[in-house]
Structures are given as C-alpha cells and as structure tokens.
Image: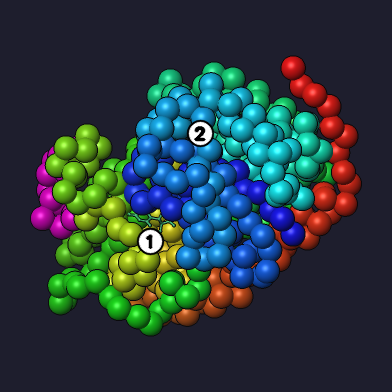
Amino acid sequence: MRIAMISEHASPLAILGGEDAGGQNTHVAELSAALAAAGHDVRVYTRRDAVDLPVAVRSADGYDVVHVPAGPAEPVAKDALLPHMREFSRWLVDRWRGGDWTPEVIHAHFWMSGLAALAASRQTGVPVVQTYHALGVVKRRHQGVQDTSPARRIGYERELGRAVDRVVAQCRDEVGELTRMGVPRSRMTVVPSGVNLGTFAPLGPTAEREDGRARILTVGRLVERKGFQTVVRAMAYVPGAECVVVGGPPAGLLETDPYARRLRALAVSCGVADRVRLVGAVPREEMGRWYRSADVLVAAPWYEPFGLTPLEAMACGVPVVGTAVGGIKDTVVEGVTGDLVPARDPRALGAAIQGLLDDRIRRFAYATAARERARRRYSWAATAERLVEVYGDVAAVRRPTRVVA
Ligand code: UDP
C-alpha cells in the first residue's frame, strides 16, 4: 500500500530526549520501518524545522521522510504549531494532486497531524487513520494551569475522533478516555505500539557499572509528568542502589537545563545526590546498552498514554517497577513481569524497588516473563500487520471529496 504518515512535530530522524522528542518519534520511525520491510511504500511527512533540510530523505530503513514547509524553518514548540497546520495540509494537497504519488491511506500521529490530515482528506478523498499518542483531557487533568496546549485542543480531539475513518487506541485506558470524550467505540481499534526486538534484547553490549551497587534505571524526556522527582525521592528508601536517569538534553547541556537542575537540587536535599546520576540524551541505537546494565527499570509517570520505555526494558529482560497508569497497566503484568505502584508516591515506589532488589529469584522470574511477553505480543512486525488490516478496511471505502473553504 501507499501509506502517508503525518507526524507534524515528531520526525523519525530526530535526536530523542528533548522536551518534544520521544515516544512518537520512535513509534513513527519503527512503524514506518516495519511497514517498509513488509513491502509497503511509506512516506513520512514532518515539519521542516531547519533551513538545511532537503525536501525528501530516504531513511536507512527504506521509507521516505518529507520535510513540509509550514511555519518557520526552525524549531517551534509543539504547543505553538497549530497556526501552521493549514499551510501543512495545503502543501500536502498540492503535492498529492499535482505529483505522481498519492497515498491510499493517511495515518496521522497526534491531534494536530489529524487536523492537517482531515483537511487534506476532504479535498483528496484519501481516508484517515488517527493515533493520538496523548490526549488533551488527560494532560489538562494532571497538569491543570501548567498545560500549555492550545485551548481548543480537547474540542478538536473530540471532533477528530468522530470525523476520521478509524481511531487507533494504544491501550485499554485510552479506549476509556476516548469513550468518555464521546468518540464512538465502533470507530476504535486497539493496536499497541511495538518494540524493536533486535535493538532491545537481553544479550549485547552493556553500559559500565560499579561492582556491588544495584542499578535503577529511569528513562524519558525530562518533563515533570514523567515523575523523575518521585524516583529521586524514592531513592531515600533504596539505600545502596544508584539511580541513572537517561534523557533530556545532550550531557553537555544538562548544567543549563532547568529541570535537570531541579532534579539535582532535589537529590541533594534528599541526601541521595551521590547515588543519582543524570547522563542526558542517549541515541536510540545505544539505549539497549543502558537497559541491559540495569537491575530494575523504573517508570514513574503521573500518566502515560502508552510508555515505550517499560516495554523496551522488558524486551531486554529487565523487570519493571512502574506506576499503575495508562499503557503501563497493559504492558506490565503485575506480579509476573513487574510491580505496579500508585503514581506520585515515593514511599510505595521505594518499597517496591527495594523489595525486588532483595529478591533475586523474583527478579529473575520477572525478567524471563518480561522478555517473553515483549517478544510474543509486541513485535513491530505484528503491530504493522494489524495496522495494514485497518488501512485496508478504511481504504476499501473511498471518502467523498469536497472543497473546504
Ligand atoms: N529515548 C531515547 N533516548 C533518550 C531518551 C529516550 O532514545 O535519551 C527514547 C526511548 O528509548 C523511547 C522514547 O524515547 O523509545 C520515549 O518514549 P516513551 O513512550 O517512554 O515516552 P514519550 O516520549 O512518548 O512520553
């Protein structure tokens, strides 16, 4: 099939760890690679955010990345991108109408991509599949006034859910949220993200570690909702272990990163500064080294639309202690592949980590089951196959086109 992925802010070629570069980038890159490997013709459309970017690049994984000129050719925070989506969609329509390549299906990632996709669809008749990756209602609930999303995000997300041809939810929790928003269940299909079982495997190079000191690893964009502060506080209940935090800006810029500074200050005030280490952003291909070096992966977000990092750790045969939120409740099987605790509870988190560190046999059993679960249920090849079925279903029904003013 000819498949157009739209990922306005999250390029599959970006360096990860920064504020707006994480799971969606990985998801789009891996999914596109798996679809290309299965013989599909995939083009990923992402915003041109630097002047020196060529219009199209062929990735090493066999799909094309097209840089769409919409808004300034420089980094723009994701929450400021909405005004440029009309230009984004116009550019797509011009291309698809005038060129030799028109997609059979558009798969939009994140709500703003959905708006651009829907506008393009109305003029070209190409059906739209929508993956939200994150929902405004959930963000607003947890972040309140600190949520900098455009005010109309929640309304747009509801409308999108009703207007697109299919919504792909990534976990059961998301189905519940979408249903409460008023998106009909009949429009949804649940297809979880996958994990790269080649990159993330138990055997392979391992990051160095100190002898005799257990390692807790936690990974993600350095933003508050990822709960790194809870992890730092929990370290007071896990004496003797070190905590390694992967993510954020490149190591050299951690000193000036406000959130990294806050985390370090918190570690000092909790008396754990000598056991908390921030390493900054790590390239995707090197992440396996860090997971394999850990005894336990801790994922302590306040909320999590899917959560790739627990799954990546599981694929490496590393047990997870996570918060019982969002997609983590689906990927981690409590008492089988890891333990779940309430969010924002350092004491509960610390007790769960220490309990697991104290029990080698349980750790081993979790590790084995985690690897097995990741391998059997979360390969990208399987995810791509399920999505191709969805694409086929929606492409079989061509949409009417109409010119939108
Ligand atoms: N990641 C990375 N380098 C880093 C930090 C994160 O490659 O320094 C990757 C990580 O391996 C995972 C993604 O970024 O694939 C984060 O995805 P997740 O779903 O955990 O969080 P999100 O960014 O979607 O909130």
Q: Residue drawn 83% across and 44% down?
A: 186
Residue 342 in view, yes or no: no
| Residue 72 higher or lower than 99, as above or below | above
Residue at label 2?
A: 69
85 within the magenta span: no
Q: Position of residue 403 (x, y in %)?
A: 80, 24
Tell me the amino acid under the disc marked 1.
Answer: Arg
Viewer-proximal residue, 54 or 29? 54
Residue at label 1?
A: 284
The boundaries of the magenta stretch are 262-278
Q: Position of residue 148 (x, y in %)?
A: 44, 24
Q: Residue drawn 74% across and 59% down?
A: 1
| Residue 52 higher or lower than 360, as above or below | above
Local secondary structure at mark 2:
loop
The answer to which quarter of the image holds residue 401 is top right
Q: Are marks 2 and 1 in contact (CB under 8 Å)?
A: no
Tell me the amino acid under the disc marked 2.
Answer: Pro
Viewer-proximal residue, 223 or 319? 223
Q: Which mark is residue 19?
A: none
Q: Residue drawn 53% across and 25% down?
A: 84
| Residue 290 higher or lower than 219, as above or below | below
Magenta region, main secondary structure? helix
